[in-house]
Image (spheres, helix red, strand yellow):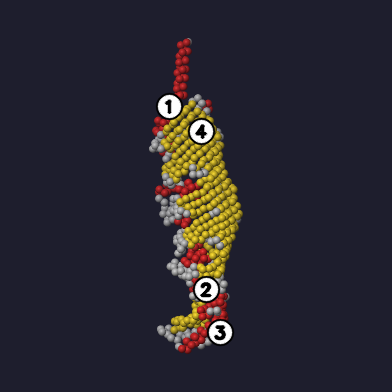
Amino acid sequence: MKRMYKVLCWIFGILLGLLLAILLLISPVARYVVEKNSKSWIGRTVEIDKLGINLLNGRINIRDLTLFEADQDTVFFHVDQILVNLNLWKLWQGIYHIEQLHVVDPSVRIIQKGDSLNFSDLIIRFSVNSNAHPIDTLPGKPLKYILEDLSVSGGYIHYTSRDFEADINVEKMTFEIPAVSWDDPELDLSYSLSLASGGDVAGSFHLNQQSLDYTQQVQVDSLKIAFILPYLQPYLKVKQLDATCLLAMITAGNINDPYRTAMQGKVDIRQFNLMGWKEQKELAFDHFSIAFDSVNTIKGFAKIGDVLLDGLYLKEDRYDSTTLFKKLIIRNFNGETPDGRPPDSTFIKASKSNPIILLVDYIKEMQKEVVIDSFSAKQVHITNGRMDFIDYTLLKPENIYIEQLTLLISDINSSNCNAKGTFHTKVQTTGQIDAEFSFCPFKPYDFEATYQLKNINVIHYNEYSIFYTDYPFKEGTLYYNGSISLKNEQLKMDNNIFIKKIYLGEKVDNDAGMHLPMKLILAIIRDKEGNVFLEMPVSGNLKDPKVNYWTLIKQALGNFFRKIFSSPSRQLAKEYGEDEQFFKDICFDKDQLTLTGRQKHQLDKLAQVLTDKPQLVVDFQHLVYHDSVGYTPSDSIKHQTERRNLLLKNYLSPYLNDPENRINFSVKNEPARKANDDSPCYRLVYSVMK
């Protein structure tokens, strides 16, 4: 009996020793096994500084775990500590119960080029093998699990895109899941993180794991958006992009249907600044905000609150065939260059990892999947806007700037096809533009507007005047009332222009303009106070790719001035309410040496014209019809011509201060129109005093 007792003691001692040996050695042995076999198991080397496994209380403590890249020289993943507490008693009941899982200071380095990642080998190794045997699909007992107190603190991610030379560092990451279990489909997650470039993000996420319905809240504070610049540079010649974003948003939806969601919140962007290829500010604003009162793509409605934009600055340069913004474009978001060249395979592969393109593609797909039947916006309000416009298509660049720009559109909604707005701005310091307009929200390019320009100093636009007419302005103030209608891309404009005391400087010779006799034109259309009234209609079809606002306005101006130049008598007849013949010629009967009533009426009107237009000169060209070369009129014809010249001059002279310089007489030889064409006629030719 005593011997049996000793044997049992030895056995118990041995078992206890084995148990103690296991308890003492399991941690270093497990660490050794993991490190030795990690290469064969996962294709990567793993190093663990300390590993503690307590089989008595189910506690596992891992410190300084490092997972290397496939090249074994560079760290891919590192974590300071992983602490796991298992409930061993529940394990005997078939329930995998993790009471605590804490991950402290994990850091990972992600490198992407095209669709390849620096952990693609791990994805391939652990992906489902298509050649594997089919798994048993018979229904079995569900895996019972409980995970409590899951947290990640102090996390760090360094992401590098080799395609775009982009580096994004995410730090101070925290994730917390209070509990998740096999018998409770509800999952709650809260998180926070910071970007090294600036900005904090925090939020919560709730998911029903059975229905995959979710709700989430996101709060973004002082996020610097400069990190997206590398993703824009393949498409735009942008040197710098700065802004700070603030966001508060609540969204709800279903993971299986990413295009249908409900959202509510507000987005603020402050101190936006885009610097283009010329390394100068191209687009900027102080503050932009948009309130999403209620947007539901499931039910097809969007209710927007206030849309505010303050301190807008826009720089626009116009070149021969394009504008500055077009010059900024390297390619569109489909990858095509402005000249129509498609992207190469390398670019296509890289674009698949570009978040800008992913967002654009998502919006395109949403437009296909979602129909918004009802929408509204409380107001769109732009304040304190500025714009610098430089036109390089002229002989010298012309700089036009506007300031104090305001735009207000209220009560925009899908049931109102007559939304109204107002616009105001100052131009070149002294000028002012005011406009009222209306449009249909369903067809924003169909609109009507009336507008006024006041107190515009035309001297500020001398480069246009020189380019198109060869003459600069010396004096003049423009007032402009007009209306515009655009329906189905058919443009119609009615423009009434009043220019007060407009005078020209000396002619500037150039090869580019219309070379119009502007001094004669102004002498005809200007009244005695030096004012000009013009009507300039514009119309055209904007569906024609060769037609735009600039070409239409240029064409209208050219047609207007050419019409005046080609037929000044028509312009004078229109202004003074007579037929064109009144200001075109004066004819006498053969041997007539006195004035008829009609001729006196003509001369009265002509005297009024010369009085009202003090720079205008009239040349009475006596037309002599003949077919022979070297024709010389007889002395009697010369004598009659001189008497008629004197008759005309004596009649007009009392009305003129300087008749010698306002009335000229000349002879114009013309081919005979008919055999007996000998009735004396004067053609009225208009010019300007030198």
In whole angstroms, how far apart are the C-alphas of marks 2 and 1? 106 Å
Q: Which residue is mark 1?
A: 29
Could you tell whether 165 is left or right of 534 in the image?
A: left
Asked if labels 1 and 2 touch by Cβ distance under 8 angstroms, the answer is no
Between 620 and 41, the one lying in front of the other is 620
Residue 596 is labelled as 3
Mark 2 vs 1, N-terminal side: 1
Q: Nearer the viewer, mark 2 or mark 1?
A: 2
In whole angstroms, how far apart are the C-alphas of marks 4 and 1? 23 Å
Residue at the image point whose x is 45% and y is 50% from the top: 233
Q: Secondary structure at mark 3?
A: loop
Mark 4 vs 1, N-terminal side: 1
Q: Position of residue 674 (x, y in %)?
A: 46, 83
In whole angstroms, how far apart are the C-alphas of marks 4 and 2? 90 Å
Asked if labels 1 and 4 touch by Cβ distance under 8 angstroms, the answer is no
Q: Is residue 49 visible?
A: yes
Q: Which residue is mark 4?
A: 102
